[in-house]
């Protein structure tokens, strides 16, 4: 397995280009199942999760061609309605093929998903929503089987906002007969990106990006060219890294409006953040002020930035409290930060107290999930000495060439094959 080695202590300087968002690209690729033709998706990042969902679609008979940062998916050749365990277990987002398969073919068989070990992320709201649309759902031998000769519009209320649940039901509802209303829907920018793309294909959707979405079903969708938005979590990761190292970094091809919660917290630490429509510049003052954070559904502080922000708080001037409300098992990275000298106490499954210290020490550490790996990179960049991070395949699922991008900013970082 590859490892990442970092010699810490170098402030980051320069410009970095943000890639397309993994969490936007995955549902867009899944949406190509809805179309009897070729869908072109632009600004697609080169990530392991993208490769995984492409392999899944190819296994189901779709034609998939990569053209630089574009992806062309031909849904006209789909001839299989099953997503097998061997492919689905690698990536939780594979569940996103369930809604489109059911909507177009009236039948889908999808293995229960895998993914990062950051706590239970049940798909019950996906299934209840599909049942409300008229599907017959059964779970046998680790597979979800859904059947519905014809989906019918319905009013669906989510007990709590769910991003993949909202996306799955959006894609199912666009081909249902009648009107579907999704209440307490997720409001993330990736939801609006998917809605905009489905509208380009001929869907009728109103309210994307709000808690109430209305979808008027249509008989068919048509091929279109659709775009992946910039990755707001990659943007936030580089912003935090710039502040943590005492650097001066301009982040290009980003949408600051999508990360208001992150920017507000960074400014509260004393970092200077200047934004335009598609860029952000981050500079740090001498002292990092401690700041409390609480993860919340969008537009609150994202759970996918909690680990990176914890790494920043390890060298803050005082103590900070971190409250994780989305996943119950997302402090695994804290144990690895402790190996680097951090002073962190997990007071409960959802609360952590971080006492800032003068500096971290390089050490051998192990990534436990995608965002934990990013926090360890940030910790390595600010630590004294050498840090060696193993199991970086987690990082490759969500960050495109992260060591190359940091290296161009002056970081002493390399991948060891």
Image (cartoon, grey):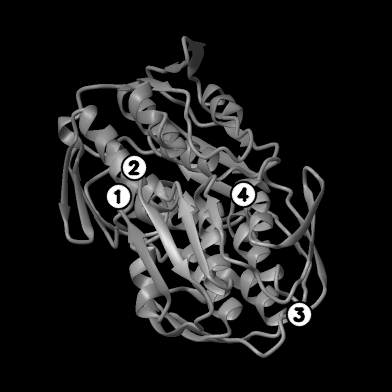
Structural distance between the alpha carbons of marks 3 and 2 = 43 Å
Residue 106: numbered disc: none
Seen in the picture, residue 213 relative to 377 is either above or below; the reply is: above
Percent of width and height locating residue 193 = 43, 57
Q: In this rendered view, identify the residue nearer to me: 183 or 322.
A: 322
User: For numbered disc 1, what is the local secondary structure?
Assistant: loop
Seen in the picture, residue 122 relative to 332 is either above or below; the reply is: above
Count how many numbered circles sit on residues in the image: 4
Task: Name the quadrant of the N terminus.
Answer: top left
User: For numbered disc 4, what is the local secondary structure?
Assistant: strand
Tell me if I can see residue 203 in this picture. no
- The residue that mark 2 highlights is 31
Q: Nearer the viewer, mark 2 or mark 4?
A: 2
Which residue is painted at 32% across and 39% down in the image? 53
Disc 1 and disc 2 in contact, CB within 8 angstroms: yes
Structural distance between the alpha carbons of marks 1 and 3 = 47 Å
| Disc on the earlier residue, 2 or 4 | 2
Q: In this rendered view, identify the residue nearer to me: 147 or 400.
A: 400
Which residue is painted at 47% across and 82% down in the image? 12
Disc 1 and disc 3 in contact, CB within 8 angstroms: no
Percent of width and height locating residue 373 = 51, 54
Percent of width and height locating residue 124 = 60, 26
Structural distance between the alpha carbons of marks 2 and 4 = 21 Å
Dot 1, crowdedness within 10 Å: few (<14), some or many (≥20)? many
Residue 289: numbered disc: 3
Which residue is painted at 41% across and 59% down in the image? 4
């Amino acid at each position: 397995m590859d490892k990442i080695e970092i010699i810490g202590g170098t402030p980051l300087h320069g410009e970095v280009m943000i890639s397309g968002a993994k969490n936007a690209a995955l549902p867009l690729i899944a949406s190509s199942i809805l179309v009897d033709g070729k869908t072109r998706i632009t600004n697609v990042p080169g990530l392991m999760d993208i490769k995984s969902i492409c392999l899944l679609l190819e296994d189901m008979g779709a034609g998939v061609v990569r053209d630089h940062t574009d992806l062309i998916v031909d849904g006209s050749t789909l001839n299989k309605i099953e997503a097998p365990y061997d492919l689905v277990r690698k990536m939780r987002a594979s569940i996103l093929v369930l809604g489109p398969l059911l909507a177009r073919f009236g039948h889908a068989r999808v293995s229960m998903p895998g993914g990062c070990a950051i706590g239970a992320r049940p798909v019950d709201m996906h299934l209840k929503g599909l049942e409300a649309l008229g599907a017959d759902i059964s779970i046998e031998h680790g597979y979800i089987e859904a059947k519905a000769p014809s989906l019918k519009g319905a009013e669906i209320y989510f007990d709590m906002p769910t991003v993949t649940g909202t996306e799955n039901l959006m894609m199912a509802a666009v081909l249902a007969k009648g009107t579907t209303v999704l209440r307490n829907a997720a409001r993330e920018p990736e939801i609006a990106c998917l809605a905009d793309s489905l509208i380009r294909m001929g869907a009728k959707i109103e309210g994307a990006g709000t808690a109430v979405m209305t979808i008027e079903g249509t008989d068919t969708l048509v091929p279109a060219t659709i775009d992946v938005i910039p990755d707001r979590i990659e943007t936030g990761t580089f912003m935090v890294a710039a502040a943590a190292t005492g650097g001066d970094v301009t982040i290009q091809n980003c949408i600051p409006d999508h990360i208001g919660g992150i920017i507000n917290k960074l400014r509260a630490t004393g970092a200077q953040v200047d934004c335009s429509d598609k860029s952000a510049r981050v500079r740090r003052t001498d002292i990092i002020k401690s700041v409390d954070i609480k993860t919340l559904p969008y537009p609150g502080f994202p759970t996918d930035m909690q680990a990176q922000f914890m790494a920043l708080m390890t060298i803050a001037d005082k103590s900070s409290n971190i409250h994780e409300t989305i996943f119950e098992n997302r402090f695994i990275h804290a144990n690895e930060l402790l190996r680097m000298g951090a002073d962190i106490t997990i007071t409960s499954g959802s609360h952590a107290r971080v006492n800032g210290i003068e500096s971290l020490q390089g050490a051998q550490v192990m990534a436990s999930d995608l965002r934990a790996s990013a926090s360890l990179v940030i910790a390595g960049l600010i630590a004294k000495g050498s840090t060696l991070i193993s199991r970086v395949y987690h990082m490759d699922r969500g960050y495109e060439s992260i060591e190359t991008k940091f290296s161009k900013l002056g970081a002493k970082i390399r991948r060891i094959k």
